[in-house]
Image (cartoon, rainbow, N blue to C red):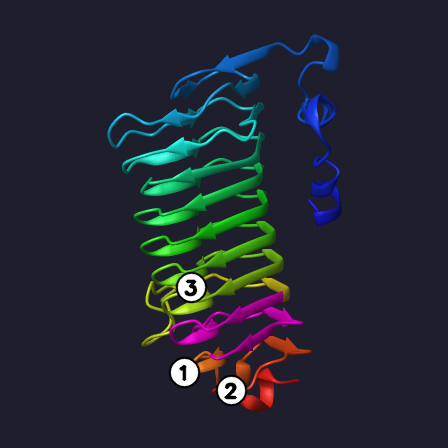
């Protein structure tokens, strides 16, 4: 799915939900039943769901668990509060979630996507004790208009994921990595800022500590495109690509005030990675990262 296609879903109210429902093969707009959500629960049937109030998860439980395919969920700007656990767990396929400027806070993982072809937009995810947004083995999902910050570990962690689109995001003040692309391929990451994270703004590699030691054995991670991004004032690196991560394209990326390197590529002469139209000052390989 292209970024332009994603934006077509981002109109207001029932028109947005009806268009998404038709795209996912659900019933026509006039036949939509609105299922009200008033407490943390499992959503186990296809349909349109709408939050009516803020929710607080009991203990360290998951608040909203989506196990069905073809679910449309509108949070209507309501907030989810946790004490561990997962805020929203997506286990079904073809799930559309519009936060409508909702916020999630206090969970171990704010949103976890284990299903394919999800669209998740218009959220703030703060104060996660592990990771704000975790994409675990999913393919074809799109995430946009996110504000992610103050996680103990990572802002966004993509693990064994493919064909992921991330656009229009602010990822800041996370304890380790802002955007961690971990053994994932064919992603497009556009128009985001990853600033003031503990180790790196953007890290392509297997280690939670950034590009340390040898690359991953059997690391299949390639064809990732980073466009029009910024990575300033992180603990060590702005952008870091680990050894054996290849065929990545970094274009129009800006980085400054990262004490180790604004741009780091662990492959000799950048390997098969393409860096061009950059705006940064320091690099471990100025010859190939400053083209």
Looking at the rendered image, the quarter that the C terminus falls into is bottom right
In the figure, residue 183 lies in which quadrant? bottom left
Label of residue 86 in the image: none
* Circle 1 Cα neighbour tier, 10 Å, few/some/many (<14 / 14–19 / ≥20): some
Does 242 lie within the magenta span? yes
Residue ID for mark 3: 219
For image coordinates 51% across by 63% down, the residue present is 194
Q: Are marks 1 and 2 in contact (CB under 8 Å)?
A: yes
Distance from label 1 to label 3 (Cα)?
A: 24 Å
Residue ID for mark 2: 282
Which range of residues does the magenta coloring cover? 229-257
Q: Residue furthest left?
A: 59
In the figure, residue 18 lies in which quadrant? top right
Does 134 lie within the magenta span? no
Label of residue 260 in the image: 1
Expressed as whole percent of the image width and height from the top left, the position of residue 236 reads 39, 76
């Amino acid at each position: 799915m292209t970024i332009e296609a994603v934006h077509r879903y981002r109109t207001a109210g029932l028109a947005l939900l009806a268009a998404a429902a038709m795209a996912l093969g659900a019933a026509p707009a006039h036949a939509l039943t609105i299922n009200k959500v008033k407490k943390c629960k499992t959503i186990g049937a296809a349909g349109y769901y709408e939050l009516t109030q803020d929710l607080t998860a009991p203990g360290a439980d998951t608040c909203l668990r989506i196990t069905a395919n073809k679910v449309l969920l509108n949070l209507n700007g309501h907030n989810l509060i946790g004490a561990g656990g997962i805020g929203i767990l997506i286990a079904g396929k073809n799930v559309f979630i519009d936060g409508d400027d909702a916020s999630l806070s206090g969970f171990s993982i704010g949103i976890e996507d284990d299903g394919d072809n999800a669209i998740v937009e218009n959220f703030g995810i703060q104060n996660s004790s592990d990771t704000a947004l975790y994409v675990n083995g999913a393919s074809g999902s799109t995430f946009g208009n996110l504000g992610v910050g103050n996680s103990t570990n990572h802002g966004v962690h993509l693990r064994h994921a493919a064909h992921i689109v991330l656009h229009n995001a602010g990822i800041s003040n996370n304890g380790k990595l802002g955007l961690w692309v971990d053994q994932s391929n064919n992603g497009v990451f556009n128009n985001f800022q990853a600033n003031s994270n503990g180790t790196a703004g953007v890290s392509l590699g297997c280690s939670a500590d950034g590009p340390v030691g040898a690359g991953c054995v059997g690391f299949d991670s390639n064809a990732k495109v980073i466009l029009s991004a910024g990575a300033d004032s992180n603990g060590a690196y702005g952008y870091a690509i680990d050894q054996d991560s290849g065929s990545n394209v970094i274009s129009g990326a800006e980085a400054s005030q990262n004490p180790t390197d604004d741009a780091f590529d662990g492959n000799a002469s950048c390997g098969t990675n393409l860096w061009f139209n950059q705006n940064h000052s320091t690099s471990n390989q100025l010859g190939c990262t400053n083209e």
